Amino acid sequence: MTIRQWKVFRAVVEQGSLTRAAQVLYMSQPAVSHVVTELEQQLGYTLLDRIGRHCAVNERGLQLYHKLVPILEAIEDLEQNTADFEKQAPLRIGSSITIANMWLPSLVARFHDLYPKTPVRVQVDRAKEIVRKVLVNEVDLGFTEGVCEEECLVKLPFSRYRLTFVCRPDWPVAKHKILKLDQLAEQAWLLREQGSAIRDSLDSALRLRQIQVKPAWESVNSQVLKQAALAGLGIALLPEQMVRPQLASGELTEVKIEGIELENQNWMIYHRDKFESEAIRGWKHLIEQTEKENGDE
C-alpha cells in the first residue's frame, strides 16, 4: 500500500463518489477507480460496493478510512512543517571581538528581519580562534579580520577599518605631529593581546622595521584600552570608528607614527565543504549587499 492510494481512497469516502473525488484530486475518474481497485487487490477485500454505475463505501472501507485519517493527517502535518525545519535550526556564528563590538549586532538584526524563524547563536573570541572554529565545524560562519590565508575557506569581504593611535591631549607625546620610530620603545602602550587581528597588524609593521614594543596594558577588550587612554595611561591602538566621538570632542587625540599606516579587512568566512543552507545563502547575500553599501560610501 502507498500513501497516494490512501489519499485517493480518503477522497472517495469524503466526497461520496469516484467522480467528485476525481475532481478534487485533479485526476480522471477512471484513474481514481484504478487506484481504489489496486488497493482492494492488495488488501484482499473490497472497500466499495459497486451497484450498476454507482458505488458506496462498505463497512470494511469505513473501518479502514477511520484508521487512515489520523495517519494521513500526521503525514501531511510533517510534510507541511518539514520546509520550516531548516529555517528553525540554529545558525552558529563565531565573531572576533572587534567585529562583535562594531558590526555584528546590526548585521544580526538585519538577518533577523529577513529570517525571523532562524535562531542565531553567537560566540565571540579572538580572530585566530574563530578561524579554528570554522575549520573544525564548531561554528557555521565566522566573522574575522586581517589576513586569512586558509585555502579551504570561502572568504567574503564586507568592510574595512583604519587603525589609529590615540592618547589623551595632555599625554607627553601628543604635542608631536609625528612620533619617530626610535621613540616607540619608550612609550606606554595600551594594546590588544597577541594573536588578535589588531595586534597582528601592529606587530607585522614593527617586525618589518625590526622594532619591538612592550605593552603597559594588554587586553582582549578594546573598550578597556580606550578607557585606559582616556585616563591618560598611554597610547592605544584602536579602530578609528571606535574612538571617533572622543576624537571629535577632544577627549582623545591621534598620534601619527613615522611611516606606519594600519588598516584591517573584515571577512565573513565558512568552510568550502560546508553545505550552503538557506540561512547561509541569506548571510552571503547580506554580506555582499553590505560590501556594496560600504563601497558606495
Image (tube, rainbow, N blue to C red):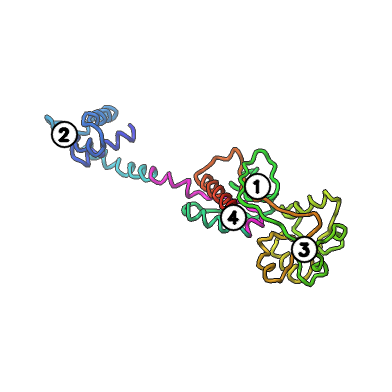
159 lies left or right of 65: right
Q: Which residue is mark 4?
A: 297
**Quadrant (top left/top right/bottom left/bottom right) for the N terminus:** top left
Inter-mark Cα distance, 1 to 2: 65 Å
Query: What kind of residue is marked 3?
Result: Val
The earlier-in-sequence mark between 3 and 2 is 2
Indicate which label's residue lies in the foreground, 4 or 3.
4
Inter-mark Cα distance, 1 to 3: 36 Å
Q: Please tell me the numbered disc located at residue 55.
A: 2
Circle 4 SS class: loop
* Circle 3/circle 2 CB separation < 8 Å: no
Q: Nearer the viewer, residue 36 or 148?
A: 148
Q: Which residue is mark 1?
A: 133
Q: Residue at x 17, y 36 (%)?
A: 56
Inter-mark Cα distance, 4 to 3: 26 Å
The earlier-in-sequence mark between 1 and 3 is 1
Q: Which residue is mark 3?
A: 255
x and y, in percent, of residue 106 in the image: 56, 58
Inter-mark Cα distance, 4 to 1: 32 Å
Q: Is residue 95 magenta?
A: yes
Query: What kind of residue is marked 4?
Result: Glu
Inter-mark Cα distance, 3 to 2: 93 Å
